[in-house]
Image (cartoon, rainbow, N blue to C red):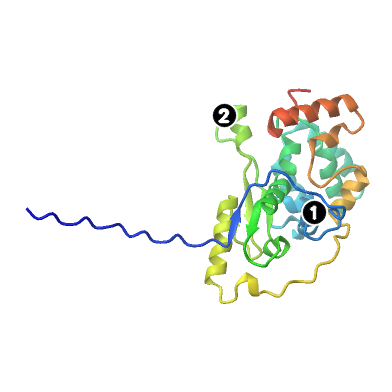
Amino acid sequence: MVNTPKKKKIKHPKPVKSIQLVKQKTIVKSRMFMNSPNSIYAAVSTQYRSLLDAIDGSDLANLPSLEDILLIIYIHFGGCKIFEDSFDTIINSEELSIRVIERALNNSVRHLCENECYLRAFHGIREFTFLWRDLVSDNDVNKAELLQGWCCKIQPLMLKDNTESKDQKRRRLPLIYASPCGREFNTKAKVINYMNKKIMSSSSSFDKMTPKTSTSCESTQLINITNDINSLYSPFGLIEELYIDNPWKLLVSTICLNVTTRAQLDTGELY
């Protein structure tokens, strides 16, 4: 009997990904953090003109009528009595304009409730900052160039049926990542795969791109609106912002955030 040698399996090399997601534990802030064009703060300030940009609604800021914008907002946050009472009060107190709507939206979502209005309103902005934070490229291109024109938007939170528990509802915070050309993705991994495919299929790679001249981050409409409400507010919807004037609750919320998840605090059950 002749022993035939076993065929060796040929291992094909995995395609090299020039862009990857590497979870970062901490962010080192320099003295120029607020003004650096490559900081997370600047990324949010340049990509989001207002909180409306973080809401999925076919480019809310460019809808033909203010009534259409109000309809989209109610689709996302309607049903919460706290939100509706605050929002309607502000809307009905002044002449309707896009500025008044944005201010009413920013004010009205800043509360804790079982509908998680505050958590969801800024969810897209926070997820965009996580994408910015974790994105790593071996090409000579900075993050501002890679993510120019990208944004992350929340989608309406729809319950599948009446038997769905609060925990099931809390785990589903649907959002989309929108590319500059209008492509949509529902995970950061798909965004990275798309970017790598674009680099591999493009005749001009990212490292051959001419870097854009970067300038210091100027104050944008989103920052101006939050500053008008309170100069200590940020465009990230931090839960600590709700308790700036209450040191005890500020301390408790900070402790809780270090031992549990943000979603568990946003239901308002601890307060």
Residue lying at 73% horizontally and 23% vertically, measured from the top left: 269
Which of 67/256 is in front? 256
| Real-space CA distance between mark 2 and mark 1, rounded to the nearest whole angstrom | 34 Å
Q: Considering only vertical position in the picture, is 75 above or below 13?
A: above
Locate residue 95, reporting x and y percent: 91, 50
Q: Considering only vertical position in the picture, is 84 above or below 235?
A: above
Under mark 1, the amino acid is Leu
Locate residue 63, reporting x and y percent: 74, 58
Q: Quadrant of residue 265?
A: top right
Locate residue 111, reporting x and y percent: 80, 33
Sequence-first disc among 2 and 1: 1
Furthest-left residue in this view:
1
At mark 2, the secondary structure is loop
Q: Which residue is mark 2?
A: 164
Q: Residues within 10 Å of mark 2 (few under 14, many from 20)?
A: few
Q: Residues within 10 Å of mark 1 (few under 14, many from 20)?
A: some
Q: Which residue is mark 1?
A: 66
Which of 169/141 is in front? 141
Quadrant location of the C terminus in the rendered image: top right
